[in-house]
Image (cartoon, grey):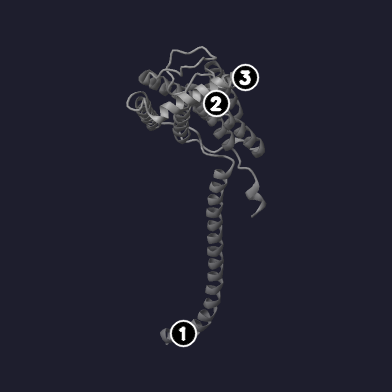
Amino acid sequence: MSASSDRPLQGRAEAAPLTRGSAVRLVSGGIVIYLALIAVGLGITHPFKDSALVRRDLDTSRAFAAHRTPLLDTLTHYGTLLSDTWTAIALSIVLVLVLRWWLGRWRESIAIAVVILGELFVFLLVTNTVHRQRPPVPRLDPAPPTSSFPSGHTAAAVALYGCLAVIVLRQMVQRKLAVVIALLCCCVPPIVALSRVYRGMHYPSDVVFGAIGGGLWLLVTVLVVVPSATYGRGARRSQGRVGRDSTGASSSDGVLGSSSRGGGSASTSSASPSSTTSSPSSGAASWGTNS
């Protein structure tokens, strides 16, 4: 491998323009996620409300409530704040501005706005359709007017922090720092999920399907909005393909050049005998004509 293949790519990977088709894909993805989540939520609250899953949900919530301690109360309070509504809004605004300043374009900022607003919209639709009651245990936080299913805090944590992790891994040239930031982002959703169950705000199934919904919306946003990788494994694969193509083209040019040079020398060498051999014949022809 040459030393040039280890250098970072020059500039940022190009971002394909967002079109009406991009909006259609986003809306279609949101509708599919909404339908899937309400199917699960209505199944839990109606035909399967007496199932083993629901009973295990209740037992787990009661077990968390029975093992509360002042230290865990404090830690889970801060764990919840990591994806609280106002935290998510403030962090999104900061990320929109910072990413625009850092990358010099709006595409990643748009991705942050799309991922958090789309998650919020899908969450509100689902929670106002399912209407699942919160666990019958003492709650450590004020209960919002939305229902228990799914967990909006968990969905927002997966979508927002996951989108930030993807952007950093794709665009940050300091690879070790990018990995550290991505790992920290990946730690937030499980912390938020456990905190919400511990504090009596959600059943375990609420946070599980909240994470799934947020993850699916994150996937849709990444596929439609987030630009390709400038750095990292995906970028190296693309760079390798470009390098192989350019190397092949250079080799072909070299072969063609040597062939043309060889052909030229061959034609020159072959032209010399023919010229020597054609001289008598041309002389004979001229002699015959003259005679």
Q: Please tell me which of labels 3 and 2 falls first in the chain.
A: 3
Instruction: Tell me where residue 98 appears, x and y as whole percent.
Output: 60, 24
Residue 281: mark in rendering: 1
Contact between labelled residues 2 and 3, with CB atoms less than 8 Å apart: no
Residue 69: mark in rendering: 3
Q: Where does label 2 land, which residue?
A: 194
Quadrant of the snapshot with the N terminus: bottom right
Instruction: Give the class, few, some or many, for how many residues have Cα within 10 Å of label 1's Cα (few <14, many ≥20).
Output: few
Q: Please tell me which of labels 1 and 3 falls first in the chain.
A: 3
Residue drawn at x 48%, y 27% is: 204
Give the side of residue 53 with respect to residue 234, left or right.
left
Q: Which of 33 and 97 is in front in this view?
A: 33
The quarter of the displayed image where residue 17 is located: top left
Q: What residue type is labelled 3?
A: Thr
Disc 3 versus disc 2: distance between alpha carbons? 14 Å
Residue drawn at x 45%, y 31% is: 212
Instruction: Give the class, few, some or many, for how many residues have Cα within 10 Å of label 3's Cα (few <14, many ≥20).
Output: few
Q: Please tell me which of labels 1 and 2 falls first in the chain.
A: 2
Q: Which amino acid does label 1 sit on?
A: Ser
Whether residue 67 can be seen here: yes
Contact between labelled residues 3 and 1, with CB atoms less than 8 Å apart: no
Give the side of residue 28 with respect to residue 99, left or right.
left
Instruction: Tell me where residue 275 appears, x and y as whole percent.
Output: 52, 79
Instruction: Give the class, few, some or many, for how many residues have Cα within 10 Å of label 2's Cα (few <14, many ≥20).
Output: some
